[in-house]
Amino acid sequence: MQTVALAEAKSQFSALIRQVAQGREIAISYGKKKETVAVIVPYQAWKKGKVRRLGTLRDRGSLFFADDFSIGDEELIAS
């Protein structure tokens, strides 16, 4: 992964985007310590990383329905 300082990234943004479009990842560093603060990745790689884990709220809440609760299929579909 290539690391680029923020000032350089600003001046060469179009060239960096072309590299990202070809599949490369670019890290952006910032500040006196040149700490990496961001990474530019291809959209498809970012999209694949969006995984939803099931059960993250387990045992953190509760749900109950009142005895007189009712909803028809039409109302449910219209919601």
Image (spheres, grey):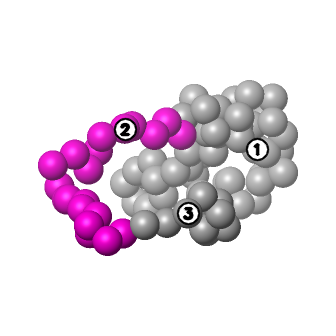
Which residue is located at x 77 percent, y 54 percent? 13
Q: CA distance from mark 3 to mark 2?
A: 28 Å
Q: Earlier in the sequence, mark 1 or mark 3?
A: 1
> Within the image, what quadrant is residue 33 found in?
bottom left
Disc 1 designates what residue?
16
**Which quarter of the image is occupied by the N terminus?**
top right
Q: In the drawing, what numbered circle is on residue 52?
A: none
Kindly check if marks 1 and 3 are in contact, taking CB atoms under 8 A apart as contact: no
Q: Amino acid at mark 3?
A: Gly
Q: Is residue 30 magenta?
A: no
Question: Helix, strand, or loop for circle 3?
Answer: loop
The crowding category of the residue bearing disc 2, from other C-alpha atoms within 10 Å (few below 14, some 14 to 19, many at least 20), is few
59 up-or-down from 49: above or below: below
Q: Is residue 25 visible?
A: no
Which residue is located at x 69 percent, y 29 percent? 24
Q: CA distance from mark 1 to mark 3?
A: 55 Å
Which residue is located at x 78 percent, y 52 percent? 12
Q: Main secondary structure of the magenta part?
A: loop
Q: CA distance from mark 2 to mark 1?
A: 36 Å
Q: Is residue 63 magenta?
A: yes
Kindly check if marks 2 and 1 are in contact, taking CB atoms under 8 A apart as contact: no
**Which quarter of the image is occupied by the C terminus?**
bottom right
The crowding category of the residue bearing disc 3, from other C-alpha atoms within 10 Å (few below 14, some 14 to 19, many at least 20), is few
Where residue 55 sits: x, y (%)? 30, 40
Disc 2 designates what residue?
54
Which residue is located at x 56 percent, y 45 percent? 39
Disc 3 designates what residue?
72
Q: Which residues are magenta?
A: 50-69
> Within the image, what quadrant is residue 26 found in?
top right
> Within the image, what quadrant is residue 50 found in?
top right
Q: Amino acid at mark 2?
A: Leu
Residue situated in front as seen by the camera: 73 or 38:
73
